[in-house]
């Protein structure tokens, strides 16, 4: 799956994979066939994207599968974290993952073979911060959006997969090294899970303003 390339368009998705022609998949209409799917412990209703997309993806991945769409995540998959209710779609647990380049640089300084940021599959990558400073952020503004950082993200074996080739160069790294200094209750942490408090347009290069931090921390600005 790491070698699949997906581009979001106004109509749906454009799928590409080495050795296969590109496929445009339109967003399923509301009257499309509904199916029940499970994301971890949540079973939710989704719309099937059709046999053509299913066949294309099954050939690319090598396993039978189907592509589905969640039209109304605002009520199709409501989740709860502590006392916070929020909306999520097909992502594991939270809608947004925030990381910083400085934290990756610190991790790579400890690794024999550095890894790129795409191993951690973040939504937003911030430059200009100190290493692990994101642990102290409570609320940030990027462009017109405001996010609350609510929980460090525990990392799994997907971080060992080269996202360009789908190959696992080292089954232990970067998790083994990360565990030496980032192991907490609940797992080995890299990045911060975030909730969207206010929607808005976010662009590369936008200033990142820290609106709230832990006590004794200082507000500063960063760049996306």
Image: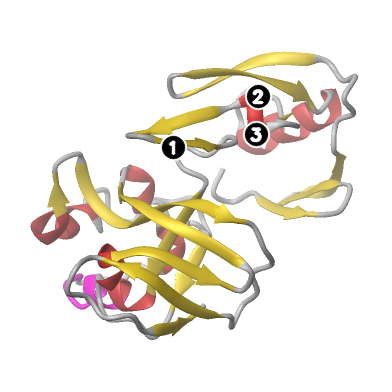
Q: CA distance from mark 3 to mark 2?
A: 25 Å
Q: Quadrant of residue 62?
A: top right
Pointer 1 residue: 93
Q: How many marks?
A: 3
Looking at the picture, does residue 124 appear above or below residue 126? above
Say whether residue 40 is visible: yes
Q: Is residue 89 left or right of residue 105?
A: right
Numbered tag placed on residue 65 in the rendering: 2
Q: Identify the secondary structure beneath mark 3.
A: helix
Which callout, 3 or 2, points to the residue nearer the camera?
3
Give residue 176's position: percent from left, percent from top: 16, 53
Looking at the picture, does residue 190 appear above or below residue 204? above
Q: Identify the secondary structure beneath mark 1.
A: loop
Which scheme is used to colour this image of the protein?
secondary structure
Tell me which label, 3 or 2, sits earlier in the chain. 2
Pointer 3 residue: 74
Q: CA distance from mark 3 to mark 1?
A: 14 Å
Q: Identify the secondary structure beneath mark 2.
A: loop
Q: Quadrant of residue 45?
A: top right
Question: Which class describes the residues within 10 Å of circle 2: few (<14), some (14-19), or many (20+)?
Answer: some
Q: Which residues are magenta?
A: 105-111
Give residue 194's position: percent from left, percent from top: 44, 53
């Amino acid at each position: 799956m790491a070698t699949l390339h997906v581009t979001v368009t106004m109509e749906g998705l454009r799928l590409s994979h080495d050795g296969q022609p590109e496929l445009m998949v339109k967003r399923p209409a509301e009257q499309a066939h509904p199916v029940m799917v499970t994301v971890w412990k949540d079973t939710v209703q989704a719309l099937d994207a059709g046999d053509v997309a299913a066949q294309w993806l099954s050939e690319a991945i090598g396993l039978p599968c189907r592509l589905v769409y969640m039209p109304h995540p605002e009520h199709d998959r409501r989740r709860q974290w502590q006392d916070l209710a929020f909306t999520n779609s097909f992502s594991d647990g939270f809608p947004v993952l925030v990381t910083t380049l400085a934290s990756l640089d610190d991790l790579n300084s400890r690794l024999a073979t550095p890894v790129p940021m795409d191993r951690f599959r973040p939504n937003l990558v911030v430059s200009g911060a100190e290493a692990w400073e994101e642990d102290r952020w409570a609320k940030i503004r990027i462009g017109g959006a405001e996010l609350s950082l609510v929980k460090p993200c525990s990392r799994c074996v997907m971080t060992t997969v080269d996202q360009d080739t789908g190959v696992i160069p080292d089954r232990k790294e970067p998790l083994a090294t990360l565990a030496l200094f980032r192991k907490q209750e609940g797992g080995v942490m890299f990045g911060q899970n975030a909730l969207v408090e206010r929607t808005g347009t976010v662009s590369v290069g936008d200033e990142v303003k820290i609106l709230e931090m832990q006590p004794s921390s200082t507000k500063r600005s960063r760049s996306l």
